[in-house]
Image (cartoon, rainbow, N blue to C red):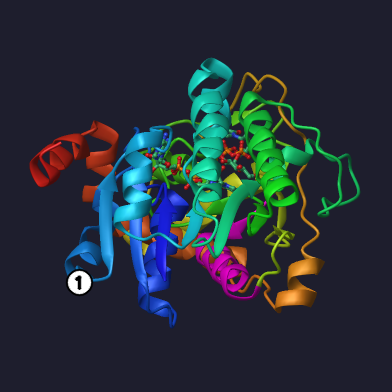
Amino acid sequence: MNLLVTGGSGFIGSNFIRYLLTETDFNGRIINVDCLTYAGNPENLSDIEAHFSDRYVFVKEDICHQEEMAKIFDYYSIDVICHFAAESHVDRSIAAPDAFVQTNIFGTYTLLELARKRMHHIKRFHHISTDEVYGSLGKSGYFSETSPYQPTSPYSASKAASDHLVRAYFHTYGLPVTLSNCSNNYGPYQFPEKLIPLMILNALAGKPLPVYGDGRNIRDWLYVRDHSAALWTILENGEIGETYNIGGNCELENIRLVEQICEIIDNLETLQFNTPRKDLITFVTDRPGHDRRYAIDASKIKADLKWAPKTPIEQGLRETIGWYINNQEWVNRVISGEYRSWIEQHYNF
Ligand code: NAD
Ligand code: DAU
């Protein structure tokens, strides 16, 4: 298998590549194409690059560049695509939607066209999407694969558009696609603009913990390694044309989650602090159009592909907090933007 992973230098993509090469029987080659936006950091995989030099290749390219991407498809004889590359942060999409429309919609279209033109050779196009395409839930109910699409932010609208395009290429051209819509991920290497790493780093530094609105919005949290396992299961056994919802079966109000992070950090003996960290919680102006509740019904992937989340939130949070504490250098370099100079030195970009 010559597996094209787009966006493999971001949070989930880099965890997925690491998982595939170190924890599964995958024996093919990975071609990671990433244009390295602020969220892409090839340092996430520098050890992988060194240890798997015969089976892992990094190519810096923008998925929207059709001619360059065509060369990559042909040169590496790509037969399977796992498409992560996206602008992924809701707050950024509210401030500046352009890049979301470009990468998430036009970038996905570009890849679909390249795959369609090589239909004889392409075995699978897997599209990674989000539960946010379904909009917001009330107090009860769950998102299933047949829930109507009701995206509410420029981010979720752009992901919804990309999902529709992927399905259209299956129905119209017979492109062998699968899709997955996943709930909120957390774990190592997550860029500290997202709730969990932001709260961990601010709590460790004794800085304010900004909670939007009343803090009662609910997300369904999934450890990123469990997401990687689900994706590999779909790639191996998922049925062509099907969509699989992936969730953590772990609904939490934001405020409870932040308090839990504070308690874990307070209880780490090595990190004594003079006041309980939850005193750092600061309620701030709400995100415009903030979706109230997400919760995934993952019964289809459980029944059909025997996948279920394995990591309880307490364990996942402990591992994640431990990772951020033990990888202070990564954190400092990401926060200071210094990893940009590493990119220049290492890749001569
Ligand atoms: P991320 O922002 O951490 O990483 C995105 C990666 O894509 C980065 O490495 C970036 O450089 C790259 N990229 C962006 N634009 C590109 C372009 N035009 N060409 C090539 N590369 C480009 O995102 P993430 O959190 O790892 O999310 C990965 C995917 O999973 C996204 O499609 C996202 O919508 C989806 N998803 C994320 C979550 C979550 O909780 N993070 C949950 C469900 C689904
Ligand atoms: O549901 C899947 C989605 O989860 C993915 O598709 C997105 O790519 C990913 O970014 C994530 O979106 P959210 O908007 O849910 O994640 P975020 O970490 O930005 O916020 C989680 C919740 O925490 C949300 O209710 C907003 C709130 N929040 C967030 C930040 C950054 C705060 O209260 N304070 C904050 O500072």
Residue 284 in the image, given as x and y percentages of width and height? 60, 22
Query: 327 or 206: which is nearer to us?
Result: 327
> Residue shown at 50%/25% (left/top)?
102
Quarter where residue 139 is shown: top right
Residue matched to label 1: 51
> Residue shown at 80%/36% (left/top)?
136
Horizontal side, residue 29 vs residue 135: left or right: left
Horizontal side, residue 216 vs residue 52: left or right: right
Query: 315 or 289: which is nearer to us?
Result: 289
Residue 88 appears anywhere in the view: no
SS for callout 1? helix
Q: Up-down: is 240 above or below 99?
A: below
Range covered by the magenta-colored residues:
220-237
Residue 259 on the magenta span = no
Query: 185 or 30: which is nearer to us?
Result: 30
| Disc 1 crowd, CA 10 A, few/some/many (<14, 14-19, 20+) | few
Horizontal side, residue 92 vs residue 337: left or right: right
Residue type for callout 1 = His
Residue 7 in the image, given as x and y percentages of width and height? 41, 46
Residue 233 in the image, given as x and y percentages of width and height? 60, 73
- Overall secondary structure of the magenta stretch? helix
Residue 338 in the image, given as x and y percentages of width and height? 18, 35
Quarter where residue 52 is shown: bottom left
Residue 236 appears anywhere in the view: yes
**The N terminus appears in which quarter of the rendering?**
bottom left
Pick out the residue farthest to the bottom.
25
